[in-house]
Amino acid sequence: MSSTIKILAPVAGQVINLSDVNDPVFSQKKLGEGFAVKPSSGEIVSPVTGKVVMVAETKHALGLQTAEGVEVMIHLGIDTVELDGKPFDWQVAAGSEVKAGQQLGTMDLQAIKDAQKDDTVILAVTNTADVLAGIDVALGTKSAGETAATITLKQTKTAPAANKDENKYQTTAREIVKAIGGADNIKSVMHCFTRLRFTLNDNSIPQDDEVNNIKGVIDVTRANNQYQIVIGQTVEDVYDELIKLLGPKYAGQGETAPAAPAPETNQSIGGKIKNGFFQLIGVITGSMMPVIGLLAASGMLKGILNILTNFCHMSTASPTYTIINAMGDASFYFLPLIVGFTAAQRLGSNPVVVSIIGGFLIYPDLVKIYASGKFSYFLAGVGINANFFGIPIHIPQYTYSIFPMIFAAWMAAKIEPWIKKWMPVTLRQIFTPLVEIFLVGMTVLIIVGPVISFISTGIAKVLQWLLTVNTALSGLIIGGLYQILVIFGLHWAVVPIIANDIAATGHSILNGIVSVTMIAQGAGALAVWFKTKHNPDLKGLSLSAAISAAVGITEPAMYGVNLKYGRVFMTSSLGAAIGGLVNGLLKVDMYGFTGSLIGFPSFVPKAGQGNPNNLLNFWIASIVTIVAAFALTYFFGYKENDADSPKTAPKKKNLADL
């Protein structure tokens, strides 16, 4: 190995010291030694010969590794992650072999300036502690590809690793696990662009200074009840070794809702209830997060289908409609199966077993029993439509449902260890899932489902009574509370009421109020999109969620954004209450099933029927709802640091942005 390596200027311009960069992360050399360039040209060349190991999704950074093991990061501008990659164009990808001086891509300096961002290009040796003995920076004006620094490498003889067969990522992973309290203290771990994100049983165990001293660790931070360890561009390598060490059950499923605080032993009853509620919401949103993108895409597809049927005269009886509708509806119809899998992963039960329980609940023959609407009699207001070994039961609608599957995942996690205690080892492989599926499946089918139906039926009767008392008051109350019913699957008894209203009278005021709640959830997500500046993942999710809500699919907005950030759901629901009040005052009626903004044709009364200004009143109520939910969320419901964004405060920058 040569003792020195020349580092070329990645762009033409004025080479300056890192200490002169207007960013504390780089100026304090938290990511390693290096230099910066005030660029005069947008052409980017490779500063070293080596391999491209990373290209940021937002294109603002690129990582290289030389044959000597030197890891170099080129960071294009400061806070340019916000620009979503628009000013940058790379001609290479991860895995590309490059030569020193070879063109890598370009950056649009004018676009960066127009966005009022600093265009300084930073070059940092991110594994400085491992490989660098010194660096000599040549300050002044340089052409792209001209030598800007010379680094001196450390001697290759280093202290032996604790295990001679370990690579450096395995060593880092092993030492991290030990320092944060071992596997017993870890609930789950996931990673973002530069950080490992641990959810721990006891956050007080890790000593930050000790973790910071581990080779390969750049920094430590605590946020959103996560213990976050900044690794840098090799985070995926360390994460992979962690999962090999811990096992796949510890693997997180992407960005999840913040974990609820651990309960205190001396909590009051009210405190325990509050803590339990937030834990439940955390489980619901965490179970939904892996499928939010799928639901948003499906919602948009169903919106397109509504446009084709309402404005392009596509027949609902055509094969084309059937195919597109099946494609858009599949993720919702089979939601119990999907949520069963993700909830099981989160709660520690067998994902395949819980998924099978979800499949059992939406099995076509069971769905037919509910769809037939045939009841032998009613018990406590719940229609008895089947029997099991002579026991009368009510089989409700499980398609589109979420809460019963979360209960199933929780119950499965509790009973599986119990089954294994008495089940002979030789029989476990077959009979453990058999007993588990039977016990959990029948508990949900015979007990949980009917209980939810009973509560839902009672709520539906209250809503009907409210509508007869005062439409404005009912609009206020139903508008504010309806989406809470959706979270727990308690809204299904309301759907038949709406269907009966439309079938019997041709219209439904109740459905008009429900439509307002969809619009409000979308407006809340839109406010999050508008206010988010430094978290591209959340920005993309919140916009797609707002669009889905506009076409009548609120799940992405509720589970992906609004519930996840608590106050957003509350302010959106307050906006819905205001919109519902206006909806009730104007007596907005609805003549079809399709709601939200895409459903405006459903508010056009037939000739000679209803208020001729009904469509105008719908738009008035909708605009009031959007303004109320958006403004309440923007000013009171959401702060960008709620999302643990890469930039949460001007004084201390979060390294996830790098």
Image (spheres, rainbow, N blue to C red):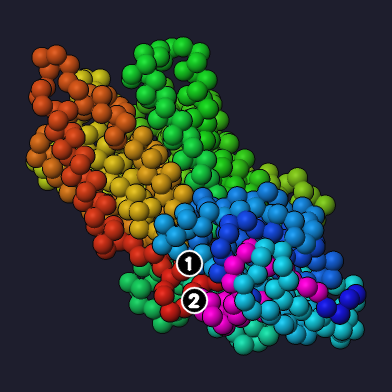
Q: Residue at x 30, y 47 (%)?
A: 523
149 lies above or below 501: below
First in residue order: circle 1 vs circle 2? 2
User: For the point 18% across and 33% down, which residue is it?
Assistant: 618
**Residue 657 picture quarter:** bottom right
Q: Amino acid at mark 2?
A: Asn
Residue ID for mark 1: 118
Quadrant of residue 277 within the rendered picture: bottom left
User: Is residue 32 found inside the magenta-colored segment of the image?
Assistant: yes
Count of numbered circles on the image: 2
Q: Which residues are magenta?
A: 5-34
Q: Which disc number belongs to residue 485?
A: none
**Where is 53 relative to 522, above or below?**
below
- Callout 2 crowding tier (Cα within 10 Å): few <14, some 14–19, many ≥20: few
Residue 510: image location, x then y, percent: 21, 35
Q: Residues within 10 Å of mark 1 (few under 14, many from 20)?
A: some
Instruction: Assign a secondary structure to mark 2.
Output: loop
Of the 4 image quadrants, the one containing the C terminus is bottom right
Residue 47 magenta-highlighted: no
Q: Which residue carries the number 2 mark?
A: 22
Looking at the rendered structure, the kind of residue marked 1 is Asp
Residue depicted at x 66% and y 76% = 34
Coordinates of residue 43 in the picture (x, y in percent): 62, 56
Dots 1, 2 in contact, CB < 8 A: yes
